[in-house]
Amino acid sequence: MDEIYRHYQVLGLEPGASREQVRQAYQELIKKWHPGLTSRDIRLQGVAQMKLKQINDAYKSALNHLTFDAKPQINAKTPPTNSPVGVQTPESEMNKGSTMTSGKSWSNLN
């Protein structure tokens, strides 16, 4: 079973749930399983602590999954959209290995 699917399952959700759904499920489970809210039975408190750890891990993983999926993939070779076409920037010159006005190569600056 895929690990992210397992984390969503702990939260009672399916992959593809919104950030708000993940947050709401987390809050409901925390209220239900918080060790301080369980009976005075030591064994039940131990179970609640383990369950709380699973819920916290699942919540962090689901948020990371949502954050990673929301970030656009950037292609390093694509020029910035705010640069006019044909204008040379220091970054593009450095990538070509061209020389600066002093005659030194960008790659030899280190």
Image (cartoon, grey):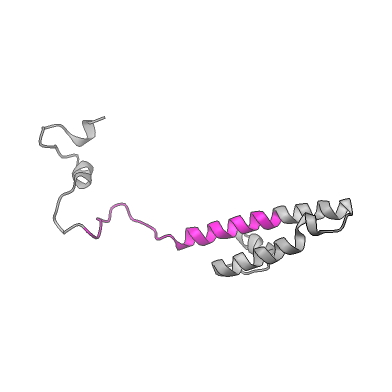
Vertical order, 110 against 18 (above or below):
above
Decide if residue 58 is on the left or right side of residue 93: right
Instruction: Confirm whether residue 1 shows in the render.
Output: no
Q: Position of residue 81 (x, y in %)?
A: 24, 60
The one nearer the camera, 16 or 36, is 36
Q: Position of residue 32 (x, y in %)?
A: 76, 64
- Which corner quadrant of the image does residue 99 belong to? top left
Quarter of the image with the N terminus in it: bottom right
Decide if residue 29 is on the left or right side of residue 97: right
Range of residues picked out in magenta: 54-82
User: Can residue 94 be found in the magenta stretch?
Assistant: no
Q: Position of residue 12 (x, y in %)?
A: 68, 68
Q: Residue at x 83, y 53 (%)?
A: 45
User: Can residue 80 be found in the magenta stretch?
Assistant: yes
- Which corner quadrant of the image does residue 35 belong to? bottom right
Instruction: Confirm whether residue 82 shows in the render.
Output: yes
Q: Residue at x 86, y 58 (%)?
A: 39
